[in-house]
Image (cartoon, rainbow, N blue to C red):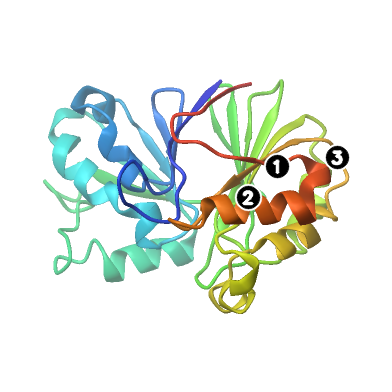
């Protein structure tokens, strides 16, 4: 299994891309602005998008992708979402006002896009790959994901703040190898992190204290212009976990 980071920033500007991870050649986990770097043939090969939550920095490329390559495909693009997220996308994005409803194009019988509802804790199996929605705690309904190749697992928290429900689940993953966890703000913005349901370095340290199994820790969703400061503060208060900044273009094989 190969996972490539298409985007992992909390914003845009220059080389920064918002959250999207490409699993092998056919699965996206979130669809932020990084998806736009793929070629048309690469876009046409994507069969599944697993969505953590409905915020634009995580879904913005879905409308453009289905509009660009939907006509090239024989089957609809399957968007895996919770019931709450599906409702938000129907009401506020694919609603004919902000963007056409591609679940009805070219017709409801053979659409270009189809939602498939996920249930937290219940794995979705794609050949020898298992993707399991995990608890998240954000300002809109949200999940993270365990991606399991059978040999090893990667956990992506998605956007979340303090999340006591996550750690008992993570600590039961016997083959956990990688943990991708957000830290959006620096410590001076802790109040903003709490209000927007993100993490800052001191909060990250409090979360990692609940991790009882070994894993390589990578930090994602850093706000533009604050990455160096955030990572410095993480080193000071959470250095014993040896967290590293997730990088655009980084590849994990497991």
Report x, y in % for residue 40.
19, 28
Structural crowding at the residue carrying mark 1, measured as other residues with C-alpha within 10 Å and reported as few (<14), some (14–19) or many (≥20): some
| Mark 1 lies on residue | 243
Judge depth for marks 1 and 2 and give the one in front. Answer: 2
Disc 1 to disc 2: CB gap under 8 Å: yes
| Mark 2 lies on residue | 231
Q: Residue at x 54, y 62 (%)?
A: 142
Instruction: Describe the element under mark 3 as helix, strand or loop.
Output: loop
Q: CA gap, disc 1 to disc 2?
A: 8 Å
Taking the image as shown, residue 250 lies to the left or right of residue 187, namely: left
Say if residue 111 shows up in the picture: no
| Mark 3 lies on residue | 213
Report x, y in % for residue 161.
64, 66
Q: Nearer the viewer, residue 104 or 147?
A: 147
Taking the image as shown, residue 164 lies to the left or right of residue 87, namely: right
Structural crowding at the residue carrying mark 2, measured as other residues with C-alpha within 10 Å and reported as few (<14), some (14–19) or many (≥20): many
């Amino acid at each position: 299994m190969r996972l490539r980071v298409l985007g992992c920033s909390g914003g845009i500007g220059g080389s920064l891309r918002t959250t999207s991870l490409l699993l092998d050649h056919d699965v996206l986990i979130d669809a932020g602005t990084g998806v736009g770097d793929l070629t048309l043939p690469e876009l046409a090969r994507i069969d599944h998008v697993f969505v953590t939550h409905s915020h634009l920095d995580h879904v913005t490329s879905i409308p453009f992708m289905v509009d660009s390559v939907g006509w090239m495909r024989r089957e609809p693009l399957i968007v895996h979402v919770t019931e709450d997220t599906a409702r938000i996308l129907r009401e506020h994005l694919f609603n004919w006002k902000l963007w056409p409803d591609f679940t009805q194009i070219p017709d409801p019988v053979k659409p270009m896009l189809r939602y498939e509802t996920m249930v937290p804790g219940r794995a979705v199996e794609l050949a020898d790959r298992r993707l399991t929605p995990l608890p998240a705690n954000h300002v809109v309904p949200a999940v993270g994901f365990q991606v399991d190749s059978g040999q090893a697992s990667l956990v992506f928290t998605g956007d979340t703040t303090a999340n006591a429900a996550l750690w008992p689940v993570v600590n039961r993953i016997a083959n956990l190898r990688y943990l991708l966890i957000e830290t959006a703000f620096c410590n001076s913005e802790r109040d903003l992190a709490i209000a927007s349901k993100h993490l800052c370095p001191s909060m990250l340290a409090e979360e990692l204290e609940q991790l009882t199994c070994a894993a390589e820790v990578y930090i994602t969703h850093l706000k533009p212009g604050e990455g160096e400061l955030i990572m410095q503060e993480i080193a000071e208060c959470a250095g014993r976990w040896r967290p590293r900044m997730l990088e655009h273009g980084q590849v994990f094989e497991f």
